[in-house]
Amino acid sequence: MGYTRLLVAVAVLIPMHASSATSVRSTDRRSTDGPAFWIPIRSYGGLFIADEVQSGFGRSGGRWFAIEHWGVEPDIMVMAKGIANGAPVGATITRPDIATSWKAKTISTFGGNPVSMAAACATLDVMVEEDVPSRAEARGAQLARGLGELKDGYDWIGDVRGMGLMQALELVQDRSTKEPAPQRAKALLEAAKDEGLLVGIGGLDGQVIRIGPSLLITEAELAEGLDRLGRACERVELAG
């Protein structure tokens, strides 16, 4: 049997994957679980890219970027979304030696848009002034407690997971088998909408309710959101 030698150029990691259920790995830096896989990538000369498009700028709580929870310094980091509060902005940062190695020409139709750049600067100033990572950590703890209470009340909530203001409920048919319950997730999505609360659906089977409030949400606003989510859960429970 012949073997093919593979050249690994880069490894891309999303520290907190919102679209596929906000799974969070161990943050023990000694653990081989999760982001620790970057070690062999670098040993083969590859580069480690951290995708912080959704998890960056304090959303994970306590740190500006989610990858920091694992004590890892990426070679390249990409970010967008919350960077300018809705204005179209994306950014890539890297080490000087990697940046200067890029010799190809680049072109961007909308790159450097002055309005978007002004929005990004203003947004980042507010994030620093409001200490968004600390706020997300505090409100994330409040959110986790509230979601945990909902799990205690409904046996079709199989798991609560996430960090900071990026959390999720996994809905199941049975907690022991973890069989996904996508129809119940859709029902909860609609029930929440009826309560004036917008949430999202993710997960490989569409069984996960995604929750990502504003980074500047207040304690009272989050409490109200949890109350509305609780009423939505009750609607789904009564509907069977």
Image (tube, helix red, strand yellow):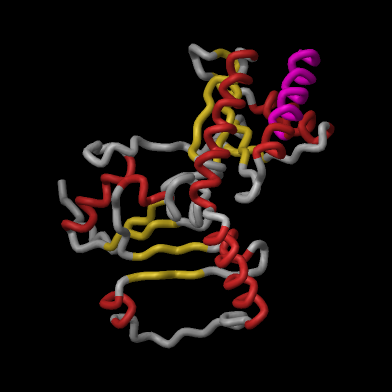
Q: Residue at x 74, y 33 (%)?
A: 224
If the image is split into quadrants, where does the C terminus sit?
Answer: top right
Taking the magenta stretch, the answer to whether it contains residue 231 is yes
Dividing the picture into quadrants, the one containing residue 191 is: top right
Residue 131 position in % (x across, y down): 52, 54
Q: Is residue 12 depicted above or below 103 in this figure? A: above
Residue 76 position in % (x across, y down): 36, 65
Q: Residue at x 39, y 52 (%)?
A: 13
Q: Is residue 122 depicted above or below 17 in this figure? A: below
Q: Nearer the viewer, residue 72 or 226?
A: 226
Give left or right: position of 39 versus 87.
left
Residue stretch in magenta: 225-240
Give left or right: position of 214 versus 135.
right
Taking the magenta stretch, the answer to whether it contains residue 207 is no
Q: Residue at x 32, y 46 (%)?
A: 70
- For residue 55, say whether it is visible: yes
Residue 48 position in % (x across, y down): 31, 59
- For residue 10, say whether it is visible: no
